[in-house]
Image: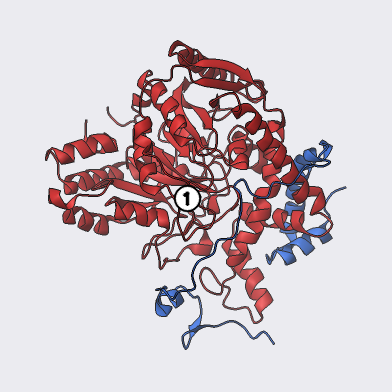
Amino acid sequence: MELHELGLYELQSKLNQGEVSPQEIINAIFKRIHEVDDKVKAFLTLDEENAIKKAAALCKGENRTGLMAGMPFALKDLICTRGLRTTCASRMLENFIPTYDATVASRLNNAQGILIGKLNMDEFAMGCSNELSAFFPTHNPWDLNRVPGGSSGGAAAAVAAREVPVALGSDTAGSIRQPAAYCGVVGFKPSYGRVSRWGVAAYASSMDQVGVIARNVEDCALVLNTIAGKDPLDGTSADIEVPDYTSYLIPDIKGLRLGYPREFFAQPALDPGIKDLVEEALRKYEDMGAIVEEISLPYSEYALPVYYIIGPAEASANMACYDGVRFGLRDLEADNVLDMYCNSRANGFGDEVKRRVMWGTYVLSSGQYEAYYLKAMKVRRLIKNDFDNVFAHIDLIITPTTPTTAFKLGEKNNDFLTSCKNEVFTVSANLAGLPAISIPCGFSDGLPVGMQIIGSAFNEGKVLQAAYAFQQNTPYHQYKLQIGGEQK
Amino acid sequence: MTLTIKEIEDIALLARIKLQEDEKDKFAQQLNIVREFTNRIKELDTEGVEPLTHVLPTYNVFRDDNVCPSSPREEMLSNGPLVEDGQYKVPKIM
């Protein structure tokens, strides 16, 4: 196996045994990126010069004390990196150079990880296909004519294409798990509050969570160990002890109670091929000693409409900071402040961002607030209650991650709402703040399929345990893709 | 009931987004689709349900009022689209 194909554990073991140097790893990663990224288009910015310097500084083994020493990683381009352009894939921030690192970036840096570059996404994380990047769409490495999903599509595509072993994304309604499913990799959204959001451009603050995309569950656990925990700079980060997540990597789930929600499996939009694979996975779990039972989440059918009110409402407030004064695009011709605001935002935002900001403004406006925003918050309570009831007697919930596999680029251009209905199974975990992972569980018509495992709040360990057990008993995460006619 | 062009103009002004004439029609149609989609929640009886504002228990976070390092002024200003004499410059407001 070539270096760029290895996960963190294998790379670390080769480093520790002196078989490779950090420079060789970084060189292999950039060689791979230069070979395939003109097809995949996962990266917006590379940090090659700095990465090579950091690798050189780690050439002596005794310098490598960090949890991520010498390990390459990449970041979705809404995570601020000091001195390195951070665009949110928007014209608004095309030339924005942050003056600080996001907490998650500095934690990875402090653990001696090596930042490779910044990844493409839907503009300001609003979208589900990466086609809404203001710069260019990312392509799904399994089939370059298809979308990688989104909004962390660049992250999932880069990891799947073996351009980088791990990446951080963000997930507000499924933006880590849905692209992970489409690209056949592992995507983990931790509990709300588990990981600091400081320095991460906000979309919907009560749902946004930073998480990990990797090619296997153990790499997810290692990165989560590095980034999780209370951050004084993020008042919503939880002051709850962080366990060693790698201690949950045991392929044993005997006696674990798994529930499958009948409403999800009865979804008319659910592709029969995906349904079969997840049902087969449930049988596999039973064979492994888990107790599998049907459960009900009766209010889950309202999750998407609720998200389409609360998400835009919060976005309309968060996006107010892009006013053309302190950073970002500005209409320099405007001769009064109101025109400066309105023109700068008209020029800087794409249509989806404008739609969500305007819709959010509407649902918060007097006369509409009670009917939409307040009502949605009440239904959000009912959705969370569903989960509380279920977790009183089961350990984990198993669902398909998405109702379909990756769709074709351009296929849903004229239907902005339909593409996001692919978040129908993932959005509830954000509304309820729960940890949820998507792992590969097979292929339907040659395209990867993801299975979602949802845990109760702050039970990331159990989610990882069930994911790891499945991974160790199935071959799906080992299938190698070939990019656009690439030789094996 | 659907959103009118007048309502779209009002919302766009509140949201500080300038719309071209042809965009008003387009966004009115699209936001009406979103409105239709979200109207579903109105069928639910939520009498007596406490709104969920935050999934975690919320409390005020206090810290001591100590002086600590912050980003250097010049660096912060370097992202400003228009800067003069160490300050952001905007069109006249009065």
Q: In this orientation, which residue lies closer to the viewer: A37 or A7?
A: A7
Across and down, in percent, residue A433 comes to 58, 42
SS category of the residue bearing label 1? loop
Give A105 or B7, whichever is nearer the viewer. A105
Q: Position of residue A317 (x, y in %)?
A: 65, 60
Residue A404 position by quadrant:
top right
Name the quarter where the C terminus of chain A is drawn. top left
Going by the numbered disc 1, the residue's amino acid type is: Phe
- Residue occupying image coordinates x 68% and y 75%: A338
Q: In the figure, is residue A265 to the left or right of A157?
A: right
| In the image, residue A467 above or below residue B70 | above
Which chain is blue in the rendering? B
In the image, taking residue A344 as reference, residue A252 lies left or right, namely left
Residue behind mark 1: A136
Q: Is residue A405 visible?
A: yes
**Which chain contains the residue that carries disc 1?**
A
Q: Which chain is red?
A: A
